[in-house]
Amino acid sequence: MKYLSVAIVFLLFSCGNKEDILLPKSNKTVVSDVLDHSPIYVFFRTKGKDTLAEVNRKNSIITTNWIFNIDKRLPLRIVIPEVMKLQEKKREEKAHKNEKAENYYAYADSIGKNMAFIPFTKVYYKMDKPLNEGLIFYFKKGTDLVLVNDDKIKKSEILNYVNSFNFENNPKIVLVFDKNMSFEDYLLTKISIAELDTFKKEVPQEFIF
């Protein structure tokens, strides 16, 4: 069965109630298909003036690839701590660990009209400010400009900016995201800078600050 069909059935009929997750949309596909997967759903909820993330992972199997379906409206300060908890649970599993099992974020491919995915298995998130070392890219909410150390550039210029330096060794690249940025803005940024991964040799870290 196609993953998209599974998602639609769950969203419309889970527990007899209508459940909605608004997924991010992009015109670029990073990964088109994931086999042997389990879904994890993170819903957008409100309680009074508060925004909450409600996690449903009852159908997740530890040995499979996990696909995170996260509502695009959730801010990073709320959703990333939930992602971190699930990452740790999978990393700490000993008895049934599958070293090949990956974690993916799901999004909608607006061109192909289907589901697409981007892996984040190796990313370690930190909810604080990074040390002042390496090339630090700070992505702020509501702007297309990125602060890189003391320079401001457009997101579309990031790869050219990095390639403009004559490094003897690949630099340490640090990604920092505004904690109030929406999950959709975060994911679209990740998709647009996916090629930066070719410069990274260290364990990927992302700071939410």
Image: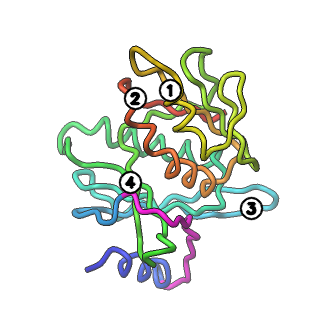
Callout 4 amino acid? Tyr
| Front: mark 1 or 4 | 1
Q: Earlier in the sequence, mark 2 or mark 4?
A: 4
In which quadrant is the C terminus drawn?
top right
Identified at 49% across, 83% down, the residue is 12
**Relative side of 48 to 192, left or right:** right
- Image coords of residue 35 (percent x, y): 23, 64
Q: Earlier in the sequence, mark 3 or mark 4?
A: 3
Callout 1 amino acid? Ile
- Image coords of residue 60 (percent x, y): 33, 59
Residue 104 - label? 4
**Would you name the residue on which mark 1 appears?**
173
Q: Is residue 20 magenta?
A: yes
Is the C-beta separation of discs 1 and 2 under 8 Å?
yes
Vertical placement of residue 177 versus 33, above or below? above
**Magenta-colored span:** 16-30
Q: Earlier in the sequence, mark 1 or mark 4?
A: 4
Q: CA gap, disc 1 to disc 3?
A: 38 Å
| Front: mark 1 or 3 | 1
Q: CA gap, disc 1 to disc 2?
A: 7 Å
Identified at 38% across, 23% down, the residue is 202
Which residue is nearer to you in this view: 151 or 79? 151
**Would you name the residue on which mark 3 appears?**
47
- Characterize the local packing of mark 3: few (<14), some (14-19) or many (20 or more) Cα atoms within 10 angstroms: few
Q: CA gap, disc 2 to disc 4?
A: 19 Å
